[in-house]
Image (cartoon, grey):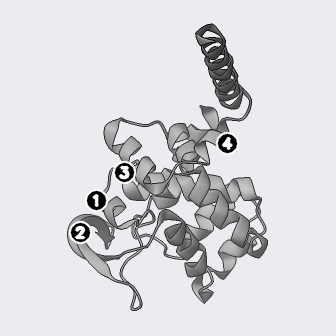
Amino acid sequence: MRKINNLVILVIAGIVATSIAILFIEEPDKIKHQYSDWQIKKTAHEKTLTKKQIYLLLHRPVTISVNRYYKDFNCSKEDLKLSLVALICLETGNLQSKTMQINNLIGMKAVEDRPSFTFMTNEFINGEMNIYKQNFASFYSFEDCTNNFFKLLTKERYNNVHKAKNYKEFVKKLAKAGYATDPDYAEKVLRIIKNIKNN
């Protein structure tokens, strides 16, 4: 009886191990899709991540938001994902920023209907970078944050962003509309996208 039980346990363990291996080899996004916000923060805190690893790690919140709002844009879902993840990499210093504590991935400043927290940040005024105290919006989750990124783009000043046909146009139009104060913002985001695509 004991030999039969051990054999059953070994067979079950083998099936489980094979299933996990198949998921990792054939469908890695199914694994990444399961990461919670807490797991993302923990992973980013424990090790230095490549831009491609961050892209995979943020699969869940970014994909959910893109699927919800992509019809408002001319560019593809993949271009929206690449643009948003690259923007997140830049805004959070590869998920190392203190704004991660309040689920703010996109550097969004305080707004009336949300609690906010004060952090030091780099801002460009008249072409010169200085460090300032700024109030940043707090979000319930990463998904709440990425949803609010697309809601922000419904403002009139971002109308041209919706007309972008690809990620390059999207990023350039976003920067031109004044999303960030850094004059090299678009160039930096596009460099990150190139890094993601090449790895």
Name which residue lies at 67% across and 81% down: 159
Find out whether the residues at labels 1 and 2 contact each other: C-beta distance under 8 Å. Answer: yes
Mark number for residue 93? Answer: 3
The numbered dot on residue 98 is 1
46 and 190: which is toward the camera: 46
Q: Judge whether 41 appears above or below 149 on screen.
A: above
Where residue 17 appears, as percent x and y from the top left, is 63, 22
Amino acid at pointer 2: Phe
Q: Could you say whether the residue bearing mark 3 is in a helix, strand or loop?
A: loop
Amino acid type shown at disc 1? Lys
- State the quadrant of the C terminus: top right
Tell me the quarter of the image containing the N terminus.
Answer: top right
- Please tell me whether mark 4 or mark 2 is closer to you in this view: 4
Mark toward the start of the polypeptide (2 vs 3) = 3
Callout 3 amino acid? Gly
Question: How far apart, in angstroms, are the residues tagged by discs 4 and 2?
Answer: 35 Å
Residue 176 in view (yes/no)? no
Q: Position of residue 87 (x, y in %)?
A: 50, 58
Dot 4 or dot 1, earlier in sequence: 4
